[in-house]
Image (cartoon, helix red, strand yellow):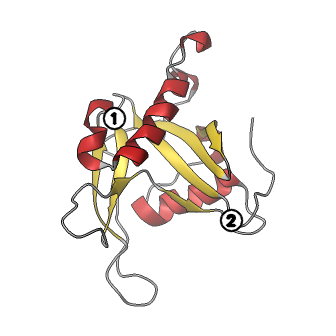
Amino acid sequence: MHDERAEPATSRCQGLLLSGRGAILLVRRTHRREGDPRWYEAPGGPVGAGESGQRALARAVREQTGLSVSQRQMRPLLAAGRSRVYLVGPLREASAIRLPGRSAVGGPPPFDHYVWARPAELTTYCSLPAAQVLWAALRAVCDPACGRRAAGRFRRAA
């Protein structure tokens, strides 16, 4: 099922980018709260006017990590209010991730580091609310009612 409908301009999308080994790709914002090293998050951002959630996520992933993901690699997992979480993967952990350079206005880059985190490590890298959203998405992926891991339904990323 592809989400081709345009979302309201105030919507947000987030990608649960999974490796074949079950690790989650997280990126760290350059500007974070003073003294809080746990400012990692899953790639994503606002959905532009007239843009589908999946198209916005593909754009955000490309801008934040340099990875190209197709809408066919995505499956909707969670919807809470105007936020959507999509499963993307499986990806290779050795994928060539390129964090963005300087921001559009010439300031420091918006993201300065990335990590492939195991689910048990999420609170090491993320705030508790961010980790809880990712855990809820993982539960949707591993729901026994599916009969198999959702990542198994995807073709390997090229």
Q: Quadrant of residue 74?
A: top right
Instruction: Decide if residue 96 is in sight here.
Output: no
SS class, disc 1: loop
Q: Which one is in front, 133 or 88?
A: 133
Q: Earlier in the sequence, mark 2 or mark 1?
A: 2
Task: Please provide percent x and percent y for residue 54.
Answer: 66, 51
Q: Are marks 2 and 1 in contact (CB under 8 Å)?
A: no
Instruction: Decide: is 115 above or below 60.
Output: above
Task: Please provide percent x and percent y for residue 121.
Answer: 25, 37
Instruction: Decide: is 115 above or below 121.
Output: below
- Which residue shows up at 52% across the image and 21% down it? 152
Bin the neighbour count of mark 1 within 10 Å (Cα to Cα): few under 14, some 14-19, many 20 and up. Answer: many
- Most extreme residue toward the bottom is 106
Quarter of the image with the N terminus is top right
- Which residue shows up at 32% across the image and 41% down it? 93
- Most extreme residue toward the right is 5
Amino acid type at image mark 2: Thr
Marks 2 and 1 sit apart, C-alpha to C-alpha, by 29 Å
Amino acid type at image mark 1: Ala
Q: Is residue 60 left or right of residue 109?
A: right
- Which residue shows up at 41% across the image and 81% down it? 103
Q: Quadrant of residue 102?
A: bottom left
Q: Nearer the viewer, mark 2 or mark 1?
A: 2
Task: Please provide percent x and percent y for residue 113.
Answer: 26, 61
Residue under circle 1? 23
Residue under circle 2? 10
**Res 124 label:** none
Q: Is residue 86 left or right of residue 30?
A: right
Q: Which one is in front, 111 or 81?
A: 81
Instruction: Decide if residue 77 is in sight here.
Output: yes
Task: Please provide percent x and percent y for residue 51.
Answer: 73, 62
